[in-house]
Amino acid sequence: MPDYPSYLKAFESGKLGEIAARLFDTLSSCAICPRKCKVNRLENKTGFCKAGKLAKVYSFLSHHGEEPPISGTKGSGTIFFSHCNMGCVYCQNYEFSQLGAGKEYTSEELAEVMLKLQGMGCHNINLVTPTHVLPQILKALQPACEQGLKIPLVYNTSGYELPGAIKLLDGIIDIYLPDMRYADGAISKKLSQAVDYPRYNQEAVREMYRQVGRAEFDSDGLIRRGLIIRHLVLPNRASGTDKIMRFIAEEISKDTYISLMSQYLPYHKASGYPEISRRLKKEEYEEAKKILESYDLLNGWIQDSYGSERFAGVNIKPA
């Protein structure tokens, strides 16, 4: 069994099955994320995220709108999971992240989705908003491996993660794609109902970097392993770009690949929050780019769309 993707070795050794079973059992008193709602999801009781026993999927597709080394030429095999452990008032995907649109999938059905995306030629399996359904994903990986899944997993997360849960993914996930959304707890509380986001986010990103290090690419420019951090620039400096970039430079690595996104639009309930009720201004994004340069963070991508595009990989170029 090859060592790449890492989950194949974990599958062969039994580690994958052991961790999947352990995490699935914890759903009886769910504490998979920082919310620690302690509801019995195995009986379909729901907490903040509103997810029950089964993973719910809104859609899956070959996605060409991610960062270039993720989408490549054949697309990223993206699975959009319904529900979320964040409560962002500006969420562009609120129809399924907060309102719960989508269809429930068993582990076997979710495995079939992964295999179908691989069969379409996708470069990877891109798990979008996986935090609250991590046990279900790992459980689905078992039959997927048995049936020949062999492309890497992208853990595409809001970054509101328990470091302990991320530690369990060591040797399973090769590519981490977390957001670093906020530097200030008061702002993350107001805009995403997550006052402790900065603390958990930073601890989780530290652990991700410990596991996989800086991004590594193959001869075709596709990411093979490593960390890419996304940072969505919000109006009126609400995202705390300076503090976040200082953290990355001083506590992660100046070699870190960063996707600096300008695509913010005031979706969902954002019109009710004056500080974020408009598009990002060009000068605000230019300020964020200068902050990157000031900390010698020169790896990654910038996005000169200023809200005219919805996806990270559109109008994107090297930093």
Image (cartoon, rainbow, N blue to C red):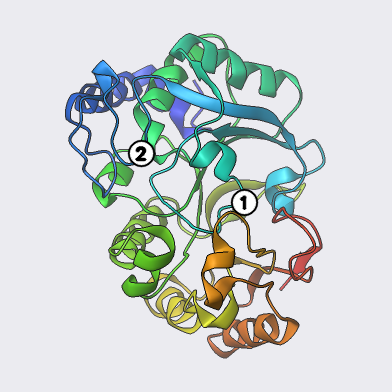
Q: Which mark is residue 314?
A: none
* Residue 231 in view (yes/no): no
SS label for mark 1: loop
Quadrant assignment, res 303: bottom right
Q: Where in the figure is residue 174, as x and y percent of width and height?
A: 49, 42
Q: Where in the figure is residue 289, as x and y percent of width and height?
A: 65, 82
Quadrant of the frame with the C terminus: bottom right
Of residues 80 and 141, the one drawn nearer to the viewer in this rendering: 80
In the picture shown, does residue 289 fall above or below 44? below
Label 1 crowd bin: few (<14), some (14–19), many (20+), radius 10 Å: some
Per the model, the C-alpha gap separating discs 2 and 1 is 28 Å
- Work out whether mark 2 precedes mark 1 in sequence or the reverse, and give the earlier one: 1
Q: Where in the figure is residue 295, as x and y percent of width and height?
A: 53, 86
Give the residue type at disc 1.
Answer: Gln
Q: Which residue is mark 2?
A: 169
Label 2 crowd bin: few (<14), some (14–19), many (20+), radius 10 Å: many
Q: Where in the figure is residue 156, as x and y percent of width and height?
A: 52, 46
The reply to whether callout 2 and callout 1 are in contact (CB within 8 Å) is no
The residue shown at (74%, 66%) is 307
The residue shown at (43%, 26%) is 137
In the picture shown, does residue 238 fall above or below 81? below
SS label for mark 2: loop
Give the residue type at disc 2.
Answer: Leu
* Residue 111 in view (yes/no): yes
Q: Is 68 situated left or right of 234 in this image?
A: right
Quadrant assignment, res 150: top right
Q: Which mark is residue 92?
A: 1
